[in-house]
Image (cartoon, rainbow, N blue to C red):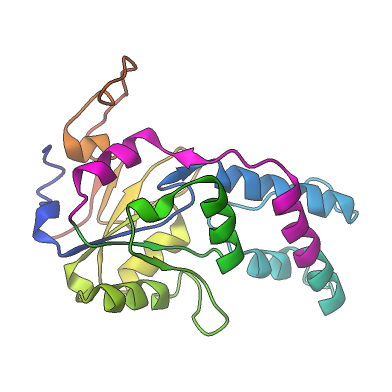
Amino acid sequence: MKDIGGLDITAFDAFLFDLDGTLVDGSDKHFMRCVHETAEELGHPGVYIPPGTPLRRFLKEKFPEADDEFFQKFLERNKEKMFEIPRPVRFHDDAEVFLKKYTKMPKAIVTNCHDWEVALTERDLDIRQYFSVIIHKTPEVPSKPSPDLYLKAAERLGAKPEECLVFEDSVPGVAAGKAAGMTVVGIDRNMGQDLSRADYVIDSFLVILGEERIPGENKKYKVQNTKHKNRKK
């Protein structure tokens, strides 16, 4: 295993993963496309939502003068588009290799998605083969950057927050993991996210595995050293 600034991932009792972007490719882009097309359909062209941003909060900031009827119409139409527009999702190659390496480690998905969005992903991808616990946003549990989702996942896995290692690719996700008192590894997917608050930032799960190629494939992946090391020993 490659040393990433002194971090020994085997010292943790549980791994907690964001879903869209961190593990799965295609869902973030699909969501951003749906929001863009919904806004255009409702007379607001050129609207782009940053990755990892809760839609309701984004709409209130983008359209502060809009009424509740507009918000509800936008949310309902966007949900319809999520099912209408083709959604080719798959595991990132490096993420799936990592998951296969650590099959015995207790793991959970912690996502800002609604239950129906998780179901949409499960329609196209078998994510439960690697995860026994999936924590998603509900009306009762605040979304990221609140730590509540991560704390709930740790409780479900029977792990203390300080014993959990979080993998995230967005600013709200990193903030949530840190607020929960967990160690956070930022996965830089070149989505323009400032992950510098994470304890470590890498560009691929392969950095942790010390590999440059996906086993069984000829394609060579670029593996960089840790971009940041903010964790203090």
Image position, residue 125 (x, y; %):
49, 46
Q: In this view, does 14 lie to the left or right of 45?
A: left
Residue at point 41%, 38% (across, down): 92
Image position, residue 62 (x, y; %):
73, 63
Q: In this view, does 219 lie to the left or right of 25?
A: left
Residue situated furthest top in the rendering: 218
Is 157 or 66 nearer to us in this picture?
157
Image position, residue 187 (x, y; %):
35, 46
Image position, residue 93 (x, y; %):
37, 33
Q: In this view, does 193 lie to the left or right of 66?
A: left
The main secondary structure of the magenta stretch is helix
Residue range (magenta): 75-104
Image quadrant in which the C terminus is located? bottom left
Using the image, determine if residue 28 lies above or below residue 150.
above
Residue at point 40%, 78% (across, down): 148
Image-quadrant location for residue 189: top left
Residue 125 appears in view: yes
Residue situated furthest right in the rendering: 43
Residue at point 91%, 54% (across, down): 43
Residue 203 appears in view: no
Residue 85 is one of the magenta-drawn residues: yes
Residue 207 is one of the magenta-drawn residues: no
Total numbered labels placed on residues in the image:
0
Image quadrant in which the N terminus is located? top left
